[in-house]
């Protein structure tokens, strides 16, 4: 999305996870990483990494522009952490899990931990989450098609 919005071209360097890609930046193997804020935050705070832009305004990076503020309003990408269950899980169990998870997320201690990692809690019902996920898949499918992206 950033390539498409900026006209720049980047070489994708696959890492096995966010932690390894952050280490790649710290060791000078790569020039930048697109990451959720929490993994990079300790290194940003220490001054070893510089936050160029974030998906959303956050108190943990008050001086970092959002992608829109940096000139890329068309780049709409928000990292998510979702809880899922196997297909076929009985609806009553899905509902019970949903209620318990939302309750935990609303607790002050958990909410503080989310905010410290620049995560925005969303209290979707399972049905609302399914609709949002379907829309997100369609949006990314279009980006993948338009940019001729293929699995290696």
Image: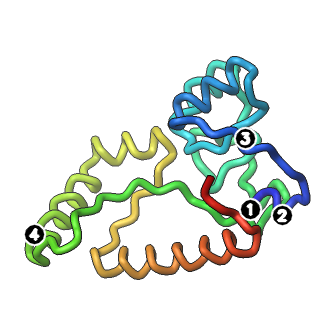
Q: Nearer the viewer, residue 18 or 87?
A: 87
Which of discs 3 and 4 lies nearer the camera? The answer is 4
Task: Determine the residue positioned at 57% across, 59% down.
Answer: 78
Task: Determine the residue positioned at 76% across, 61% down.
Answer: 68
Which of discs 3 and 2 lies nearer the camera? The answer is 2
Q: Which residue is mark 3?
A: 63
- Asked if marks 2 and 1 touch (Cβ < 8 Å), the reply is yes
- What whole-number distance in Å separates the C-alpha atoms at marks 3 and 1? 23 Å
- What whole-number distance in Å separates the C-alpha atoms at marks 3 and 4? 43 Å
Q: Which residue is mark 4?
A: 93
Q: x, y percentage for residue 2?
A: 78, 57
Disc marking residue 143: none
Residue at the far front in the pictured view: 152
- What whole-number distance in Å separates the C-alpha atoms at marks 4 and 1? 37 Å
Q: Secondary structure at mark 3?
A: loop
Task: Determine the residue positioned at 61% across, 29% down.
Answer: 22
Q: Which residue is mark 2?
A: 5
- What whole-number distance in Å separates the C-alpha atoms at marks 2 and 1? 6 Å
- Asked if marks 3 and 4 touch (Cβ < 8 Å), the reply is no
- In primary-sequence order, the first of circles 3 and 4 is 3
Q: Quadrant of the N terminus?
A: bottom right
Q: x, y percentage for residue 36?
A: 55, 44
Q: Secondary structure at mark 4?
A: helix
- Asked if marks 3 and 1 touch (Cβ < 8 Å), the reply is no
Task: Determine the residue positioned at 23% across, 63% down.
Answer: 85
Q: Secondary structure at mark 1?
A: loop
- In primary-sequence order, the first of circles 3 and 1 is 1
- What whole-number distance in Å separates the C-alpha atoms at marks 3 and 2? 22 Å
Q: Around disc 3, counting alpha carbons within 10 Å, would you say few (fewer than 14), some (14 to 19), or many (20 or more)?
A: few
82 displayed left or right of 40: left
């Amino acid at each position: 999305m950033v390539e498409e919005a900026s006209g720049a071209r980047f070489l994708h360097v696959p890492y096995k996870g966010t932690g390894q890609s952050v280490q790649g930046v710290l060791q000078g193997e790569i020039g930048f990483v697109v990451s959720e804020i929490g993994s990079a935050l300790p290194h940003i705070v220490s001054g070893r990494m510089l936050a160029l832009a974030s998906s959303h305004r956050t108190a943990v990076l008050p001086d970092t522009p959002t992608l829109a503020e940096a000139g890329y309003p068309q780049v709409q990408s928000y990292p998510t952490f979702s809880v899922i269950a196997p297909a076929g899980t009985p609806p009553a169990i899905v509902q019970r899990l949903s209620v318990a998870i939302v309750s935990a997320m609303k607790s002050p201690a958990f909410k503080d931990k989310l905010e410290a990692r620049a995560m925005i809690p969303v209290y979707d019902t399972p049905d609302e989450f399914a609709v949002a996920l379907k829309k997100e898949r369609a949006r990314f499918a279009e980006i993948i098609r338009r940019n001729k992206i293929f699995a290696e």
